[in-house]
Amino acid sequence: MRTMEKQPLISIIVPFYNTGEYLKRCLDSIISQSYQNLEIILVNDGSEDDSAAIAEGYAQADFRVHVYTQANAGVSAARNAGLRQATGEYVMFVDADDWIAAGSIERMMAVMQESGADLTTCNIRRVSDPSEAVPYEDGYTLCDRDEYMRIFFRIGSNEPIHYPVAKLYKRAMLPDGLYPEGIRIGEDVLGTYRAVADAERIARMNEVGYYYYYNPASVTEGFSEKNFDLITVWDKVVEASEGREPDHSYAVLNRKRINFGLLFLMITEVPAKERKEKYAEQERQLRADLKACEKDLMNSPIVRSRKILIFMCSHCYPLMTLIGGLYNKSGKKLAVGQRRNLS
């Protein structure tokens, strides 16, 4: 391993809000990395628990850790604040309730330099048991921008790669105000598109380098008004991709697809009576919009299983609501990854 002085500086940005239960695990996984030349930027987004005290304790113990505090403004504002403070040549984002695998940063940097990539990514493992780990898998594949964008926009794929985490970025490629503020859900789609839009050469590592912690006991939030922010998100992605093909065509397709995604979430997660009382107008509009763009969606290169559900929502909606009602009565909720894939 090269000396710290010869390693390029990497800024690790960790926004946190009331994550005292998890923050130590996250920070320990960063501080113990074999790659040492790190600038660890912790952004306290108005926490009211012991998170701030934990963060300050790490800052006192390790000169690489810096804590910045702001009034609660959401994760996008916190990430943007961290990015304004970042002085590293490279940047990574880590969420405070997650952690990264031992040695992963050194390996990501090695791949970045060996491949000449503009962006290096590793795989994400979703776990509910903090002790769970998977064996290290060596190797990586290179893909060009067009190939990566097809995956990003889920053209013939349902692989979610729009997360800001599990990626090593060149700082120079990240624009100011990267993440949209004031959007309550799906902000990572627009922010990550902006972050990767100029990457021409992407290295995709085989290893699981990032662990996303999913606590089934704490997941109680279902469908709510904020889900409709996804319409705004995709309108903004369409705008951001204007004049850049094939991105723009892909973004327009996903904007049409969101009508289905929101409808499906509503009928599987919201009881019929509640839909009628709270979301009747949105439901009517989504159905009309889905019907208007059904032909485009059915002729598009999205996966067959999704086309079947789109057809069912367009032509057999009462049956779909009946099935959705039975699913809702079972007390089940779609997993986070499943919900994101639908939208």
Image (cartoon, rainbow, N blue to C red):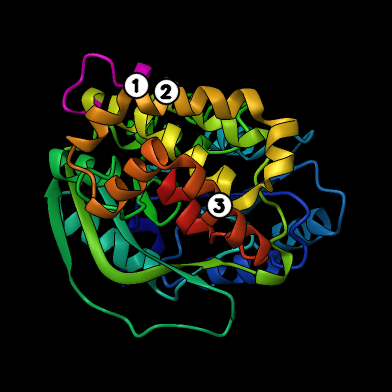
The amino acid marked with disc number 1 is Ala
Residue 193: x, y in percent? 35, 34
**SS under mark 1:** helix
How many neighbours does mark 1 have within 10 angstroms: few (below 14), some (14-19), or many (20 or more)? Answer: few
Q: Quadrant of the N terminus?
A: bottom left
Q: Which residue is mark 2?
A: 289
Query: 330 above or below 188?
Result: below
Q: Nearer the viewer, residue 103 or 282?
A: 282
Say if mark 1 contacts mark 2, CB within 8 Å.
yes
How many neighbours does mark 2 have within 10 angstroms: few (below 14), some (14-19), or many (20 or more)? Answer: some
Q: Which residue is mark 3?
A: 322
Query: 128 above or below 288?
Result: below
Q: Is residue 230 magenta?
A: no
Instruction: Identify the magenta region.
Output: 238-247
Q: Which residue is mark 1?
A: 292
Residue 286: x, y in percent? 49, 27
Q: Nearer the viewer, residue 338 or 237?
A: 338
The amino acid marked with disc number 3 is Leu
Horizontal arrangement in the rendering, residue 321 relative to residue 330 (left or right): left
**Viewer-nearest of labels 3 and 2?**
3
